[in-house]
Structures are given as structure tokens and as C-alpha cells.
Amino acid sequence: MKRTWLSIILFCLVIALTIYFPGNAQTKQSSRISMDWIKQVGAKQAPRGERIFKVNDYGAVNDGKTMDTKFIQKAIDACAIAGGGVVTFDTGEYVTGSIFVKSGVTLRIDKGVKISGSQHIDDYPIINTRVAGIEMKWPAA
């Protein structure tokens, strides 16, 4: 019984000293980490003057019934090949499976645009992916 109490008191003493004297190298180093990344996250305004690629010009139909995956992907691919820009949608609803946004491409979804995911698993190709650190084949979504 005395040993248990002694262990508890010793444990509390170690915790108290750790809190009171936090000046280890790790703490001092972490206080010097730049927080500039905070300004770089979140929603951003699309750059003005970039080329605009409308998915509707590539065949997408904003009726909420037509499967638009290949048309949206065509617009994304054309945008990437052109060196980047903004992919936009006319107002309406679009149905899609997996799409793959590429480097330099901004996908802009304006007010009045609704993008619905397909209910069919076949519209999501199986790709190599990592889930919880395990490499496996999984539907791209």
C-alpha cells in the first residue's frame, strides 16, 4: 500500500516538474516554427486573367441526369494541356463519377452549380491507393 502511494506521489511530482520546467530542446525548437502556412490554406479566389474552360463546351449537360464524367474530365485535361486555367460549369446539376484534377487546374464551382456523385460503383475506376498506410486497390472517389 505504501509503495502504491509512493508511486503516485512520485508520478505527480514528475508531471508537476515537467509542466513547471518545459524548457527542453523540443519546446524551444517548436516555438520557432513559422506559422505562415496558415495564410495559405482554405478557399482561394481564382486568379483573374487565366483561361476559362467551360465543361459545357466539352459536352457536359446540366440536367442532373446525364453522366458528365468524361466531359468534365475532357475540360480538365484540355486546361492542363494548355498550361493551366479555370474549369467552370454553367448553372445546373451535373452527375459524375471519379474526376482527376491536374496540376495548374482550378475547378471553380459557382453558386447555382450542383455536382452529384453517381450511384453506380462502376463509375469509379479501381486504382492503386493507400488506406490507413496499407497499399490496396480501391475505387477512386
Image: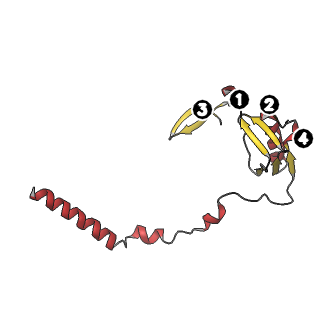
Disc sitting over residue 109 in the figure: none
Cα distance in 3D space between marks 1 and 4: 22 Å
Callout 3–callout 2 Cβ contact below 8 Å: no
Mark 1 crowdedness (10 Å alpha carbons): few <14, some 14-19, many ≥20:
some
Q: How far is the residue under mark 4 from the one under mark 3?
A: 31 Å
Residue name at image x 66 percent, y 27 percent: 121
**As displayed, is residue 139 above or below residue 103?**
above
Instruction: Look at mark 4 in the image and give the residue it sits on.
Output: 57
Q: Quadrant of the C terminus?
A: top right
Q: Nearer the viewer, residue 83 or 123?
A: 123
Q: CA distance from mark 3 to mark 1?
A: 13 Å
Residue 42 in the image: above or below residue 53? below
Point out the tag, 4 or 3, that comes first from the N-terminus. Answer: 4
Q: Position of residue 21 (x, y in %)?
A: 33, 73
Mark 2 — residue?
Answer: 65
Q: Residue at x 61, y 34 (%)?
A: 128
Secondary structure under tag 2 reads strand
Q: Nearer the viewer, residue 25 or 3?
A: 3
User: Where is the N terminus found, in terms of image quarters?
Assistant: bottom left
In this view, the mark in front (3 or 2): 2
> Which label sits on residue 138?
3
Residue 27 x %, y %: 42, 69
The mark nearer the N terminus, 1 or 4, is 4
User: What type is the residue that disc 3 sits on?
Assistant: Trp
The amino acid type of the residue labelled 4 equals Asp
Q: Which residue is mark 1?
A: 123
Q: Tell me where residue 101 appears, x and y as whole percent.
A: 73, 44
Residue 84 can be seen, yes or no? no
